[in-house]
Amino acid sequence: MLVELTVKDFLNKVAGNDPVPGGGSIAALNGAVASALTAMVANLTIGKKNYEGHEELMNHIASLAMKEKDVFIADIDRDSEAYDAVFACFKMPKATDEEKAARSAAIQEATKHAALVPMQVARNAYELMSVITDVARLGNQNAVTDACVALMSARTAVLGALLNVRINLGSIKDKAFADDLQREADILERQTCEREKEVLDAINQELRV
């Protein structure tokens, strides 16, 4: 499993000539990084003077972020496995009409799955941005820049995952399925960029000397 590799070995594998792990897995990795940083900021807030009023919220955020981290970690391998499944379908026999039909159907189903995996990564990362916004505004302000990096990592997770959704949509013959995902992807991208800009603009304004 990719997630069992050291950071150094994982990055070396990314840099190799195998198409996996690729951008989809890296998008999920960014989601995991965003979650871990979110938990860190929450934990740096818990028990600190002047933040007693947010103790319950920060405990909830820390717990939620750790759960999300585990989901994104699983998605690192899940994305690569989805790509491998599509590739395997292309190797299916196609000597007869029946084999061609079975191969085509398998490719379509695998490609749909390969689009849905990063779509879920994008959805989860976007939802995490709301949590990061709370921890950035209400958490330990000595760690506010860590929350900003978490937000940017979540944005990268969303946008990177959506690219992997879109690259699969062009191969999907089910137009209704493809159109629905395309619409959702467009909305998610716009909302993600707007949310990141709103939060970062406010924090950067506060940090200016």
Image (cartoon, rainbow, N blue to C red):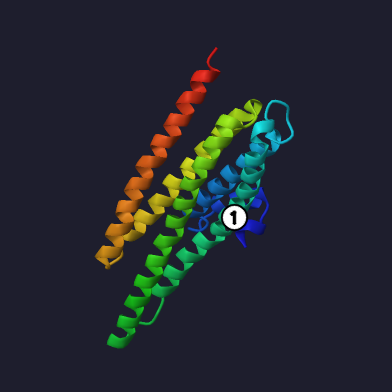
Instruction: Name the residue: 55% across, 56% down.
Output: 76
Q: How many marks?
A: 1
Examine the image and state in which quarter residue 33 appears. Answer: top right
Give the camera-side residue of 144 and 32: 144
Q: Which amino acid does the dot numbered 1 rest on?
A: Ile
Residue 43, by quadrant, is top right
The extreme left residue here reads 175
Q: Position of residue 18 (x, y in %)?
A: 51, 59
Q: Residues within 10 Å of mark 1 (few under 14, many from 20)?
A: some
Residue 81: x %, y % from top left? 51, 65
Residue 29 drawn at (x, y percent): 56, 49
Identify the residue at image location x=58%, y=48%: 32
Q: Residue at x 64, y 35 (%)?
A: 54
Residue sitting at the far front: 53
Residue identified by numbered label 1: 73
- Residue 209, can we see it? yes
